[in-house]
Image (cartoon, rainbow, N blue to C red):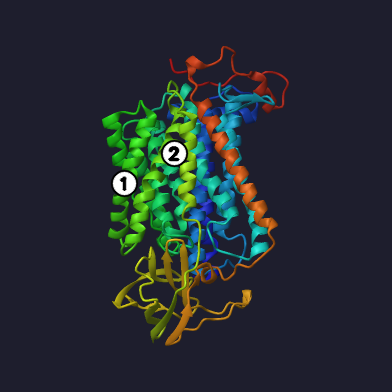
Amino acid sequence: MDPVVAHGLGSWMWLFVPVSLYVLITVGLALVGRSNERDAVLFFIGRVSDSLRRATGFPGWSMAGVLSALMALLIVVIGFYWDVAWHIDNGRDVVLFTPSHTMILVGLGGLVYAAVVAILFATVDDADVGFSAWGLRIPYSAVLLGALGTGAVAAFPLDELWHRAYGIDVTLWSPTHLQLVGGGSAATIAALLMCAEGLPAARPNRLGRGIFVLTAGTVLVGASTFQGEFDFGVPQFQVLYLPLLVMAAAGFSLVLTRLALGPWGAVKTVLVALTLRGLLALAVGGALGHTVPRFPLYLGSALLVEAVAWRLGTAGRLRFAVASGVLVGTAGLLTEAAWVVGTGWWHEIPAALAVKAALLGPVAATAAAVLGAGLARAFLPRAEPLPVAALAVAGVALLGVLAYPLPRQVGDVSAVIRLDIAGDTADVEVALDPPDAAHRATAFALTSWQGGGSRQIPLVEVGPGVYRSTEAVPVTGSWKSMVTLQRGPEVMAAPIALPADPEIGASAVPPVPERQVEFVRNTEVLLREATEGPGWPAALAYTGLATLVALWIALMAVTARRAARREDDAPDEPAPPPPARAALAGSGQPVAATGSVEPTP
């Protein structure tokens, strides 16, 4: 796609439309709401809060923060998948502030805005939530949301530092990208916890319950974002990560939301997530004209979680989580394998990959399920917290499972690549040395990208160690094509055809009738833009990421514990006072109270 067309005025409508709708809805809420405030700002906030309370049954501050966060997350997720698709289909950006980059930045900044909104509304409503500081009522979930948004936004200048040190790479899993994606994805959890923190004073009606379910569905979408490079079919890491990430996302999100929403909560979560991901695929692959991002099904896993809840109940959260995780990691994994093959996402699942996934999938799902059950205490005020030892073991197990496929090595494999060139494409034959090099492969196929799209083409064995493509491969223009071979930790590639790239000083690998090549680490072909650099930027980036993740996890734990408080646990002292609103109004005198949410009897 031509960059001028791709970044034209029409593309910016993906940002302008949701922001404009948000503003119009906010004004509409202010017009129909009620408030006795005399200060103009407090009058506006009070009317919006009153409208939200009456429309949803949730406290106004809670819905204001949640809906603002959902708007920001909508902008982020469209920008994120659009940006990944753009890089895979077209390569580097022409300008820095493309629509997709701007959407990501605005959306992540919108998470901080949503946190501020929740604080302002809670203060004006004198809501009995969070804690008091500087005359403000500060919900714990707003602190978490603000920390996630701030950390994610901080990834932008750090990412620029990373690229200056190591070149303009296009990997999704650099530390700065993980910081950005992690903050945005975890913000879905903060939004769900904001619902939980508002529950003590809530009497949710149908709309309020619908928003609650919608927010739960975004948690599963957020947990799935780390699968991005597999969704587009151009993975740079071991393909074993895909089943493990799917199992972890399913175990965590479905157990958490089943406990939060009650009966059929897991199924509702999946239906929302599938709707959102389906619409996103239509937007990126249809309206925007890029490669269609694939996504897991999760429905089989949701039904298994519901079956465990029906058979064992959910009162014993640890038992429920372990049983759900085991079933998700076994039977749920089989349903995902059937979905992957049945939809043509993958043409087949190699035996070596299936064995490793069958061994590690249950561990990933069970560990994540236990962590989800621990976080679900926010919605179960009278439930005992899970044992710290159980949560610690689950966290270590999940980290261990996800660290296992991290190494990327190179084996002693070469190939003779023969092309039958016809115009812009070529049929490919690959003769491996040794001939059995692909017999224990976890992935072996042809990959083409950055020619205006991406393709994954299977290889079939036609003789001992000799394989042919099932369809022609693009080999001209800006297309890049390679042979991918993975055998456990050996993640290798051999180029078929690569265009010259004068901007980074990379010479062409032209398509020729026959070439003998050695397999190299796949990033040497995928990331020709990457360069060696000093060690300190990497040390700074990884240290910063680890510190932020630890802070985010700690804030999630505190928020979940505090959100579990209900009216019968509330302190005797009333919420801080009218002076909080007076401070907002810029006056030293108390201001008349707005209509507040009635506590649940």
Q: Residue 215 has which mark?
A: 2
The location of residue 568, given as percent across then percent down, is: 48, 14
- Residue at image position (65%, 56%) is 538
- 101 lies left or right of 258: right
Q: Nearer the viewer, residue 244 or 412?
A: 412
Question: Dot 2, crowdedness within 10 Å: few (<14), some or many (≥20)?
Answer: many
Image quadrant where residue 414 sits: bottom left
The numbered mark, 2 or 1, whose residue comes first in the sequence reads 2
Type of the residue with mark 1? Thr
- Which numbered disc, 2 or 1, marks the residue closer to the eye? 1
Position above or below: 429 against 275: below
Q: Nearer the viewer, residue 291 or 344?
A: 344
CA gap, disc 2 and disc 1: 27 Å
- Residue at image position (52%, 21%) is 596
The location of residue 128, given as percent across then percent down, is: 56, 21
Q: Residue 583 has which mark?
A: none
The location of residue 570, given as percent across then percent down, is: 53, 16
Position above or below: 15 against 377: below
Q: Secondary structure at mark 2?
A: helix
- Residue at image position (68%, 24%) is 135
Type of the residue with mark 2? Thr
